[in-house]
Amino acid sequence: MTEAVPSYLSPTGQEVVFLLLGAVAVGSALLVVTTRQLVHAALWLVVCFGALAGCYLVLTAEFVAWVQVLIYVGAIVVLLLFGIMLTRAPIGRSADLDSGNRVVSAVVALATAAILVTVVIDGFRTAYTPLDPGAGAAKELGASIFATWVLPFEALSVLLLAALIGAIVLSRTDIPGGSPPMGPAPPTGPAPPTGPATGRADPPARGDPAPPDRPSDQTSGGH
């Protein structure tokens, strides 16, 4: 890093694009936590992750940007949508998504943001580095991952595979030990009386032969 103070009154094109993408990311993140429709929240999350990927591209970190698109946009959001469909959660407007703690959550979020912004500005106030392409390219980072960090990378892949298998097992109902399917509840009231006392005969069971005609019917039919 070089100790040079940039001119903030005349931002470059990269800085303007970075600020615009940051505003889109913050706005979509607010819509994620304020909307009352799960599907809309997942779609706004796609917009937020896409804006973050654009910020990584502006910072010449193309490998991290494409990982953001492939893993978070292409896998995490799709997993959320599949989870909504498999659990049959309501996809429309629902008042149950509001916990009533908006004021507390807003205060905590603003306090956390203020602390982070203060620390970043105080620590990197005069630090400035030019954005040279190639520092975050896929070639350098890919070689580092598959040479130095190959064991943690494979351990993470096994962990994700185990989580995927567990999600499939929990969502299936035909596997022994799974949750039984929900069916209609049997009637709990007393059964209506039948038999000679009420003058009504019991209905024949399924598969039983029909009862023979009564003698009075046969006699009347003969006359």
Image: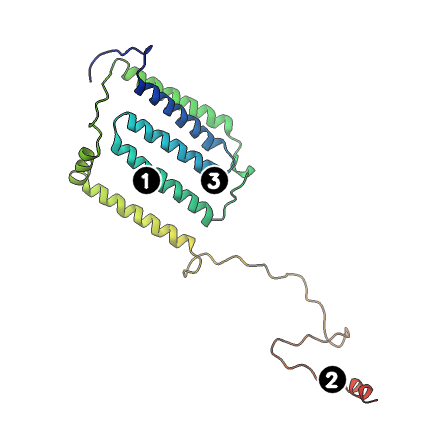
Classify mark 1: helix, strand or loop.
helix
The residue where tag 1 is placed is 71
Which residue is at the front of the view, 158 or 131? 131
Classify mark 3: helix, strand or loop.
helix
Tag 2: amino acid: Asp
- Mark 3: few, some, or many residues within 10 Å (few <14, many ≥20)? some
Q: Position of residue 35 (x, y in %)?
A: 50, 33
Tag 1: amino acid: Ile
Gap between marks 1 and 2 measured at Cα: 75 Å
Q: Which mark is residue 213?
A: 2
Q: Position of residue 201 (x, y in %)?
A: 72, 76
Nearest to viewer (mark 2 / mark 3): 3
Q: Position of residue 210 (x, y in %)?
A: 67, 81
- Mark 1: few, some, or many residues within 10 Å (few <14, many ≥20)? few
On-image quarter of the C terminus = bottom right
Tag 3: amino acid: Val
Q: Quadrant of residue 117?
A: top left
The residue where tag 3 is placed is 39
Nearest to viewer (mark 1 / mark 2): 1
Disc 2 and disc 3 in contact, CB within 8 angstroms:
no
At horizontal 27% and vertical 33% (from top left) the residue drawn is 64
Gap between marks 2 and 3 measured at Cα: 63 Å
Q: Number of labelled discs?
A: 3
Q: Earlier in the sequence, mark 1 or mark 2?
A: 1
Q: Position of residue 164 (x, y in %)?
A: 34, 49
